[in-house]
Image: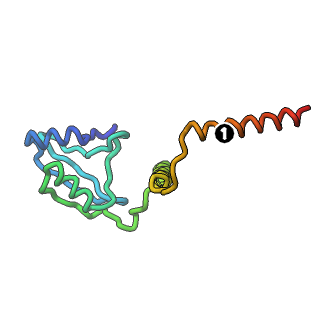
Amino acid sequence: MATDTIDHGTLSRLVEAGAVRGAHIVGQPGGWAVMVRYGMHERPLATKNTRAVRVWRRFETLASYLKGIGLTQFDVDAANFDQDAVTTAKRPDRAEALKRAHEAAAYDAWFREQVQASIDDPRPSIPGEEVEARFAKKREALRKRMVQGQA
């Protein structure tokens, strides 16, 4: 039988309504879970997407989360907590996304530097019509060479 869980939204509403009787933090291999007591129920807090029991790797992060939603008092059972079992999450998808974000930020910084350097360049600007005329001549010369090469 699947364990009934409670999600963040429901927990927040229960705390606002004053319906939460307490929270019990349970240590386990890999981190800390929360059991929420409300009404006649005690249910674990679940992750947003998978509805699996949510586990925090750091106790301080969990305590900050609970304090942030208004639960400032809770009890802790560290009997099954195993610090050696705490491992770094393997998230190659997030690592790739962060790599792309850093690359994009670096490109953006480079691009802004190039634009600023152009703005700060003391040489006089060349009118657009003159640039168009220069490149039109270059294109025409290239076309002529291409035609001569085909003949």
Residue nearest the viewer, comparing 15 with 31:
15
Residue under label 1: 135
Residue nearest the viewer, comparing 86 with 48:
48
Rendered residue at 25%/56% (across/down): 62
Is any part of residue 121 visible from this angle? yes
- Is 139 placed above or below 36 here? above
Outermost residue to the right: 151
Location of residue 1 in the rendering, given as x and y in whole percent from the top left corner: 34, 37
Count of picture labels: 1
Q: Quadrant of residue 77?
A: bottom left
Location of residue 84 in the rendering, given as x and y in whole percent from the top left corner: 39, 68
**Label 1 element class:** helix
Is any part of residue 90 visible from this angle? no
Location of residue 48 in the rendering, given as x and y in whole percent from the top left corner: 32, 41
Location of residue 35 in the rendering, given as x and y in whole percent from the top left corner: 22, 49
Q: Amino acid at mark 1?
A: Phe
Rendered residue at 32%/44% (across/down): 47
Rendered residue at 20%/38% (across/down): 10
